[in-house]
Amino acid sequence: MLSITFPTVSPILFELGPIAIRWYSLAYIVGFLFSWKYIQYLTQQKSFFAIRHNITSKDVDDLIFYGVIGLILGARFGYVLFYNFNYYISEPIRIFYVWEGGLSFHGGLLGIILTVILFSKNKDFTFLTLTDLICASAPVGLFLGRISNFINAELYGRPTEVFIGIIFPNTEGLHRHPSQIYEALLEGLLIFIVLNILIHRYKKLKQTGFISGMFLVLYSLFRFLIEFTREPDIQVGYIFNYLTMGMILSLPMFLFGVILIIYSKNNVSKK
């Protein structure tokens, strides 16, 4: 077995007095900045869309601002609900201790969806047009977030003897799957490449909802498969003998993704 030594990288990028800037925080900041600028770029490419939209740069600014709030709140409350409900219900004040960690992708997704629903109704934009733009840029943030998980030596994989193994700190010296890297490459980098080939080469933003559907399908598929290599959260463990919470939450994502893809194709056929 090929063994890789865990890199000695501090989770803290730099400290300024009592303020510590962590790689994980930087990943969120860079991810949001990229989404902000990339969505602005996409909205300016009028030929990418089947129907002319009226989304301005100011609208994108507002979307990102409210999206940040929706994502963080959704990710936090999603973690509380899906992964550690009994603990937080007994000590509800700790729900607000975000510095202790505990964010859920699926909760963040629900937070973004709710934010976009409210934003689209208030601005009179098409909901799926906005989600397509968000999904086109979001994988970059996912990539950076999973790399940060790796640096933090958290969300690591199950013990392995058949693949590249890494001995993470405080894991009893066992060689484990670097599942954070698998997620960064598949859920982040690969999804970004696929979606943007579909946008730039095949003009799939013209099929409103298609990019959103493809994001849901690809993410849920990759997440489900990678969960077989990822150590489940200790407070949750396995559900129904072998399923993890991540697997279960990915199933409705896949279903809704397929529905959106079919809906987008039917939309085109009616034009």
Image (tube, rainbow, N blue to C red):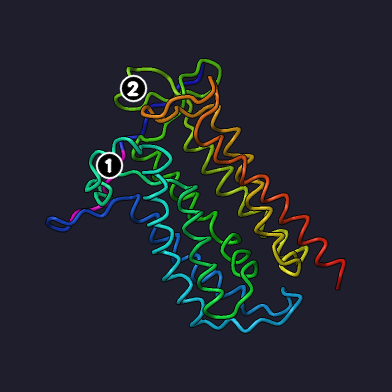
Marks 1 and 2: which is nearer the front? 2
Taking the magenta stretch, the answer to whether it contains residue 247 is no
Corner quadrant of residue 221: top right
Q: Which residue is mark 1?
A: 10
List x then y, in percent, for residue 23: 33, 50
Residue in the image at 35% along x and 39% along y: 85
Please name the amino acid that badge 1 sits on.
Ser
Secondary structure beneath dot 1 equals loop
> Alpha carbon of mark 1 to alpha carbon of mark 2: how far?
17 Å
Residue 187 location in percent, x, y? 57, 45
Q: For the residue marked with disc 2, what is the amino acid? A: Thr
Q: Kindly indicate the quadrant of the structure image that contains residue 199.
A: bottom right
Compared to 253, does 271 lie above or below?
below
Q: Is residue 129 above or below residue 57?
A: above
Secondary element at tag 2: loop
Asked whether, in this view, residue 23 is left or right of residue 218, the answer is left
Per the rendered image, the range of residues in magenta is 9-15
Upstream in the sequence, badge 1 or badge 2?
1
Image quadrant of residue 120?
bottom right
> Which is nearer the eye, 86 or 192?
86
Q: Residue at x 68, y 53 (%)?
A: 214
* Residue under numbered circle 2: 171
Q: Position of residue 143 (x, y in %)?
A: 50, 49
